[in-house]
Structures are given as structure tokens and as C-alpha cells.
Amino acid sequence: MLSTCGAVRAVEVLRLVVESTTTKTIFFRDFRCAGAVPGQFVMVWVPGVDEVPMSLSTIGHDGLCSITVARVGEATSALHKLKPGDKIGIRRPFGRGFTIHRGKCLVVGGGTGMAPLVPLIQHLEAAGAKVHVVLGARTTGEVILLEA
């Protein structure tokens, strides 16, 4: 069921990247999401299935954005079946996001919990911070977002 908080915008799936056997990153272009700050999330509507919250794993000033999705239920399984050219719905970015600091920063995350940390790392580095990242996973096959 769709919430009444913010209008749903239809976006086209541009490409999908297989991160692991259970995780994919879905790229789309949305200029409203391009104005998000690291740590914010969007509501993703899968037509005929459900609406679910997803962290942004790419926030591009050119509008290129992404979500990184682990297949764990009906909605995320439907997202995994998408192909380039398919449409999904996006609402807002929500949340306050992270505070960006300069200096030395340690960023720790694992699995799809790394998704909102990728834009954070990029913004920290752009702000001149010295960033160290610790990435955890159950197995080496579940290590994701190394290319980000």
C-alpha cells in the first residue's frame, strides 16, 4: 500500500550490477534523489507488489542514483527480477542523513549495510577527510560494493 507522504515518481531501470548471489545494485536516473545527502533513503514502489524503504548507494549530481538490494522477501525478489527499461516508483528522499566531518574517519559496515556508507565515504573524501573503511561479510562471496 502506498503512503500519502510525497508523490511517487516513475523512474526507468538503467542497469543492474550483480554484487553477489543474493545482492544486486539497481541504477536509475532521478534528479530529486541527486539532491539527497548520504544516509538518506527512498521509498521504492514495485508495481503490483509492495513499497519498501531502500538506502541510496549512489547519489550522482547528474541524477544517476542506485539502490543496493539483498533478496530476502517478496518485494526484494521482484526488484531482483527487473531488467533495464523496467519502471519502479521512487518517493522523496527521507531521513536526516549523516553529518560530514573532516579529519580522520573510520567507516565500518557489512552486507547491504554498506549501501548508505558508499556516498558517505565519497563525500568525506571530497571534504578532505582521511577515510579508513572496514567491510565485513559472512563469506568472501558476500563482499559487495568493492567497485563503488
Image: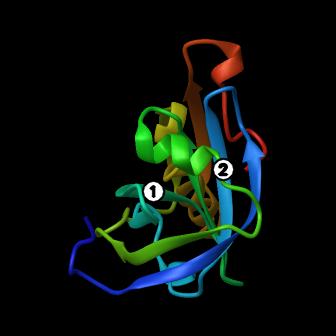
The residue carrying mark 2 is 25
Q: Position of residue 16 (x, y in %)?
A: 74, 53
The residue carrying mark 1 is 55
- Answer with left or right where residue 121 lies relative to residue 42: right
Gap between marks 1 and 2, in whole Å?
11 Å
Q: How many numbered marks have been drawn onto this rendered protein structure?
A: 2
Disc 2 on helix, strand or loop?
strand
Image-quadrant location for residue 65: bottom right
The amino acid pointed to by label 1 is: Ser
Q: Residue at x 29, y 68 (%)?
A: 95
Q: Position of residue 111 (x, y in %)?
A: 53, 31
- Answer with left or right where residue 1 lies relative to residue 133: left
User: Which mark is first along the chain, 2 or 1?
Assistant: 2
Q: Nearer the viewer, residue 24 or 113?
A: 24
Q: Residue furthest top?
A: 139
Q: Residue at x 64, y 46 (%)?
A: 81
Disc 1 on helix, strand or loop?
strand
**Neighbourhood count class around disc 2 (C-alpha, 10 Å): few under 14, some 14–19, many 20 upward:** many
Q: Which quarter of the figure is the N terminus placed in?
A: bottom left
